[in-house]
Amino acid sequence: MSHIFAVANQKGGVGKTTTTVNLAAALAAQGQRVLLVDLDPQGNATMGSGVDKRALKKSVYHVLLGMASLVDARQTSEAGKFDTLPANRDLAGAEVEMVDLDNRETRLKRALALHDSDYDFVLIDCPPSLSLLTLNGLCAANGVIIPMQCEYYALEGLSDLVNTIKKVHANLNPDLKIIGLLRVMFDPRSTLSNQVSAQLEQHFGDKVFKTIVPRNVRLAEAPSYGLPGVIFDRAAKGAQAYLAFAAEMIERAKTF
């Protein structure tokens, strides 16, 4: 049975895609069978996995609308050694087209259910808004991983996201829960970062992952080469942090 996790945060630019791609590659490097689902029309997770979004014949768009199966649309990240259900700008029109469809919130869940035994982990990169696409991600997932920066605005947005997750849990997906909060782009020299980090640990306890991902230039450079950061420069501090995070996720998964 797959562990299906949505990587979500309604705030943009907090490292959702970087986290999804690098966690997928790090889990694969530790022998896990991984599928990355790109639910963002920008297709950044697709490109970061080394898959050319401009050359796609089938994508997650076709899967959501019932025009292709997951097997037809998935691609293999040669560098990361994981499968990708890719996205491109076609996905931007999916929300309008899905409005009149039956079970519009659970179309991704139904597609993934057919391949439940194919993967150990399914990671869903959600767009930075509460849209029908994000809703599909949250309805398909068993849990949510929340990447966040340790700054004031991120803390404000966190309460909105927690409320959203509670509503989805109550109305659409009773299995959904917060798996944990991942502190990313962390600068230990910043007093504010340390204060917010301490607040998170105090309020959320063991829901805060032990791993902290530092601000790292090599992670930012990797997508331009079509590579996950953990493959681009495995020795970089950011890559080492994601490898440690993957190990922590594998351990946590045993208790779910």
Image (cartoon, rainbow, N blue to C red):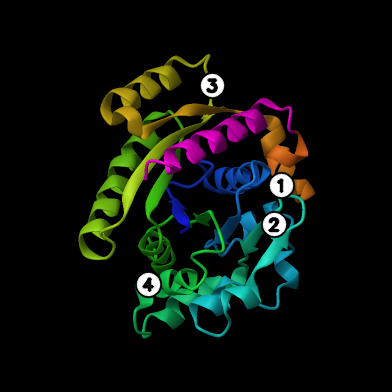
Mark 4 Cα-neighbour bin, 10 Å: few <14, some 14–19, many ≥20:
some
**If you read the primary sequence from the N terminus, does the residue marked by circle 2 or circle 3 appear first?**
2
Mark 2 packing: few (<14 Cα in 10 Å), some, or many (20+)? many
Give the mark, 2 or 4, whose residue is nearer the N terminus.
2
Amino acid type, mark 1:
Pro
Look at the image and say whether residue 219 sits in the magenta stretch. no
The span from disc 3 to disc 4 (Cα, nearest Å) is: 38 Å
Please tell me which of labels 3 and 4 falls first in the chain: 4
Residue 69 at x, y percent in the picture: 57, 79
- Under mark 3, the amino acid is Asp
Check whether the beta carbons of the residues at disc 1 and disc 4 lie within 8 A of each other: no
**Place of residue 6 in the rendered image (x, y in percent of width and height, measured from the top left):** 44, 53
Q: Quadrant of residue 110?
A: bottom left
Of callouts 1 and 3, the N-terminal one: 3
Labels 1 & 2 near each other (Cβ < 8 A): yes
Which label is found at residue 106?
A: 4
Q: Main secondary structure of the magenta part?
A: helix
Vertical placement of residue 106 versus 81, above or below = below
Residues at marks 1 and 4, CA–CA distance in whole angstroms: 30 Å
Label 1, on which residue? 223
Q: Residues within 10 Å of mark 1 (few under 14, many from 20)?
A: many
| Figure check: 155 above or below 39 | above
Type of the residue with mark 2: Met
Distance between mark 1 and mark 2 Cα atoms? 7 Å
Amino acid at circle 4 = Thr
Disc 4, SS: helix
Quadrant of the rendering where the C terminus is positioned: top left
Q: Which residues are magenta?
A: 234-256
Q: Is residue 126 left or right of residue 152?
A: right
Which comes before the other along the chain, label 1 or label 2?
2
